[in-house]
Amino acid sequence: MAAVSYQTQGEVAVLTIANPPVNALSLPVRQALVQALQQAADDAAVKAIVITGADGMFAAGADINEVASGLVLTPPVTRDVQAQMERASKPIVAAIAGVAFGAGFELALACHWRVAETRARVGLPEVKLGLIPGAGGTQRFTRLAGPEAALEAITAGSAIPAARARELGLVDEVAEDALAAAIALARRAVAEHRPLRIASDVEDRVRGVDPGLFTAFRQKIAFKARGQLAPGRIIDSIEAACTRPKEEALRLERQYFFECRDSAQREALVHVFFAERAARKIPGLPAHVQALPVRSAAVVGAGTMGGGIAMSFANAGIPVAVLESSRAALEKGVALIRKNYSASVARGRLTQKRAEETLALIHGVGDYAALASADIIIEAVFEDMKVKREVFARLDQVAAPGAILATNTSTLDVDAIAASTSRPEQVVGTHFFSPAHVMKLLENVRGQRTSAQTIATVMALGRTLGKIVVLAGNCEGFIGNRMLMYYGAEAEFLLEEGATPEQIDRVIEDFGFAMGPLAVRDLAGNDVGFLIRRGRKLPADERWSPILERLVAHGRLGQKAGRGFYRYEGRTRIPDPEVTALIEGVSRDLGIARRQIPDEEILDRLLHPLVNEGARVVEQGIALRASDVDVVYIHGYGFPAYKGGPMYWARQTGLARVVETMQRLAPTHGARWRPAPLLEHLAASGEDWDNAHEAKTTHNSS
Ligand code: 3H9
């Protein structure tokens, strides 16, 4: 099939991009577009042109593989195609269905007019790949919609719904049938001899812009964008659209595009893009296995977690019952859900109408019998095996025969929970992260007897709920929490040796994490952390630091108590001399001489345990691939996406160097610093995580 098909409907030539799966503008598409545009220009019977995409999708952008390989720069580049379009004497209209993203939208912006289908979305998501739009996107967007809208949308990489794009002036019409409406518009343009509208020549929105706008916006996103290259370059480029001549601004955009394209951040974010998609693929799942439809759901437990899970279902349009046997607890839970929706309305993220419609999908119930019709029931009760087993035994009695019974446990043995039912093949872990309606990650956990169909269903369900889904094997803590154990422990050992909570958190936050490990502990509750730790098995040659226990004994339970590793004023953390004294007391008791610890050592000491446990998780098949570990850490634990995740970080650092550092630290810091066998094997053979599966097989059999 041709990359671009050419048909005529009367005097209109319709050019259809056909490059499955997402009509990316790869080289053959660009070549075919150049030819088709020329054909239309040469055909005297053709008076206007419509560009559209096959299979209900305009174009998702440049081909990301070409960006990585450099082929994106092989002529004709997108800018060449656009120049040909802007030179054309015949009107060109874009008919946008599905999405027009990145270079796809940039192509549409170079058309004279744009018609979008009602459900279509447009946008420039390049920032999510560590890039800035490279085909005039920052320029034409700004000229059509103005700099304020451009700054917001392009630095966030937002997908803009058709109706909003129309309001912003990015598209000219919204229609049920974009192609028919675009052809009609093209015909009108011919009949009325309309002057061709070239977006890059539109001046009124980029004249007389207050330069303070850019300074203010830089400050506004400073924290969120810290450490990142692309957001700043996007602002620079939009500023150039408002302050420099057109050609110069376009040249600058191109220069910034190259700078970003050649950056380590772009490489890391492209890794993440493909890692997220690879995570959905489950090797060995028979092709004939279909996900079961989930038309209704139920959640046991109306606490923060249960409420958030219920909201995730309702937000996806799936009716959900929330069970809580105590009436007071149920009312409290439902009130919290209502409050969350009201807050979204107040922030302008949701209309009142939509909030009410969504809320109406959530039903509080007080009796297990009310769960009988649910396709899936998710247990979100207290993290205690006995309680969970009791809940599952009850669920087994009331649930529909085909219903999936899922546990939201974050650490407990899914098989032990499944064993309390008569249908272990329908039992699975669905580990949501708090707050569940906000956090993107869903870590599904496969028990020993979980069926392929159950797995297929919860993997598909995750996507329906808008989550990024990873499948983990069953072990204590699965992928994420298991890795967290040594990371958290190491932070406290560093405190014993001389670091302060604020130094540790600063180093990790400067690295790009959303929050440092001690601030996270305070947020989650030190009592909770201590309880989980007490229940965990530790190798005989390992120990826990007594710091956490002492904090709890002093009532320093974390943010909820106003004091933990820090003192809190609202959510603001303030270093507390009392904590310093407590930590120094621990060092004294243990006979540890405190010292100044360099920031680099803190970073090494915290990241290496993550990588090492990550390697064990891969080695033992708990994670299907190293990149799944990256996805879990980025979306569940605040690891900076632009650094690619812990396993990617290790690869960039060099696996041999990682092993060397661990071996250097092992004699002083204990058995936990012994490199995982898989890590040692890969480092010695010079192989990469990509070969981890083969290496694991070889390693296990040798
Ligand atoms: C750019 O345009 C730079 C320019 O400014 C510079 C010009 C000079 N390329 O996500 P899905 C694959 S940068 C190659 O699972 P969905 C994807 O890997 C680009 N492949 O489906 C997957 O493959 P597989 C800016 C791509 O329905 C399959 O398509 N554009 C691309 O959930 C299905 O994808 C973007 O960043 C691509 N551009 O979502 C948009 N896109 O089946 C990125 C997808 O083998 N894409 N694939 O795993 C998206 O946002 C979503 O893919 C989309 C579909 C919403 C389109």
Image (cartoon, helix red, strand yellow):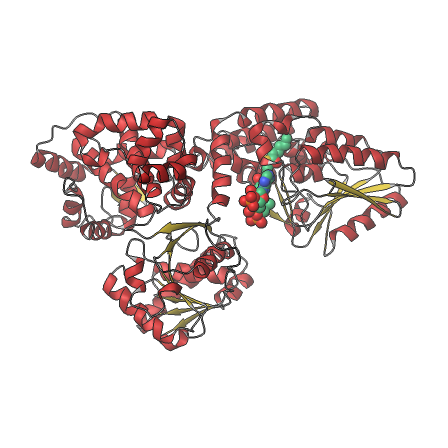
Give the position of the C terminus as an image quadrant: top left
Q: Is residue 191 above or below residue 676?
A: below
Q: Position of residue 34 (x, y in %)?
A: 77, 32
- Quadrant assignment, res 70: top right
Q: Residue at x 55, y 58 (%)?
A: 351
Give the position of the N terminus as an image quadrant: top right
Is residue 493 visible to us here? Answer: yes
Q: Residue at x 52, y 55 (%)?
A: 287
Is residue 507 visible to us here? Answer: no
Q: Is residue 384 above or below residue 590?
A: below
Q: Is residue 34 above or below residue 385?
A: above
Q: Position of residue 125 (x, y in %)?
A: 57, 39
Which of 429 and 452 lies nearest the eye of the viewer? Answer: 452
Q: Position of residue 191 (x, y in %)?
A: 90, 45
Q: Residue at x 32, y 31 (%)?
A: 681
All told, the count of numbered labels is 0
Which of 112 and 562 lies nearest the eye of the viewer? Answer: 112
Query: Splitting the image into four quadrants, where does ligand 1 fall?
Result: top right
| Name of the residue lying farthest toward the front | 702
